[in-house]
């Protein structure tokens, strides 16, 4: 199903949407077009190649999600690699229980992450990470913190629009897109791979004792 929107004429100047007083600052046509172009990107829904599924908790329905690295790649495509930044606002260990007999631990960690765009607009959201019956507090905490931060980044980005994951909250869309075949992408033909400089490698090999 294709979704089309009627084009609206862009006025010579429009109120700047991020100003404290939207009627006191105008932006140029060029800026308005950039904002409109960015909004058009954010409104797009994800294709099936971006979507993954995993079993739900307690054997419930499958959960539909986008992997963290894919969300970051999408953010770089939409905003530019230098068009956004993230920082951890807060991270809290909610519980850390140790079994005295087995010395295995259960850990739960929550994190709040802020994503700020180049123009100063920002969003925040919370993420969570948990592990059960893991040997070693250090390993458990490390895994939970990373999981919580990744989850928070994903949840924060989805507030910007469909293409960054918000479309997955539309159950009708998820049901239909999961029926679509995943296109085969020949990554090695589409993208150049970075290899070590062979000349340097050969020099090191020759100079090795």
Image: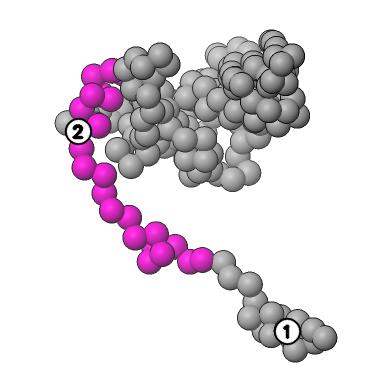
Magenta extent: 168-193
Q: Is residue 114 visible?
A: no
Q: Secondary structure at mark 1?
A: helix
* Residue 74: x %, y % from top left: 47, 40
Total marks shown come to 2
Q: Which of the 4 quarters of the picture holds residue 172?
A: top left
Q: Which residue position holds label 1?
A: 205
Residue with the most extreme bottom position = 206
Relative vertical location of residue 55 with respect to residue 196 in this rendering, above or below: above
Q: What's the residue at 64%, 25% (across, down)?
A: 134
Q: Secondary structure at mark 2?
A: loop
Q: Quadrant of the C terminus?
A: bottom right
Disc nearest the viewer among 1 and 2: 1
Q: CA distance from mark 1 to mark 2?
A: 52 Å
Q: Is residue 187 left or right of residue 198?
A: left
* Residue 124: x %, y % from top left: 61, 18
Q: Which residue position holds label 2?
A: 179
Nearest the eye: 25 or 206: 206
Nearest the eye: 61 or 170: 61
Residue with the most extreme right position = 209
* Residue 187: x %, y % from top left: 39, 59
Mark 2 and mark 1 in contact (Cβ < 8 Å)?
Answer: no
Residue 135 is covered by the magenta coloring: no
Q: What's the residue at 59%, 45% (across, down)?
A: 81
Nearest the eye: 125 or 94: 94
């Amino acid at each position: 199903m294709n979704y089309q929107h009627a084009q609206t004429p862009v006025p010579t100047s429009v109120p700047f949407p991020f100003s404290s007083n939207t009627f006191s600052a105008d932006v140029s046509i060029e800026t308005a077009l950039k904002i409109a172009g960015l909004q058009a990107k954010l409104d797009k829904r994800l294709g099936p190649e971006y979507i993954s599924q995993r079993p739900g908790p307690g054997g419930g329905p499958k959960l539909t999600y986008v992997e963290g690295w894919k969300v970051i790649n999408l953010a770089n495509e939409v905003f530019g690699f230098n068009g956004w930044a993230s920082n951890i606002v807060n991270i809290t260990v909610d519980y850390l229980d140790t079994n005295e007999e087995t010395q295995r631990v259960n850990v739960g960690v929550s994190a709040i992450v802020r994503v700020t765009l180049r123009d100063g607009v920002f969003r925040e959201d919370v993420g969570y990470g948990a592990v059960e019956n893991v040997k070693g507090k250090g390993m458990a905490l490390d895994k939970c913190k990373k999981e919580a931060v990744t989850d928070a980044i994903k949840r924060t980005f989805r507030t910007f629009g469909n293409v960054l994951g918000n479309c997955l909250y539309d159950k009708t869309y998820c049901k239909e897109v999961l029926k679509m075949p995943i296109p085969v992408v020949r990554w090695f033909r589409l993208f150049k791979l970075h290899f070590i400089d062979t000349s340097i490698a050969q020099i090191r090999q020759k100079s090795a004792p």
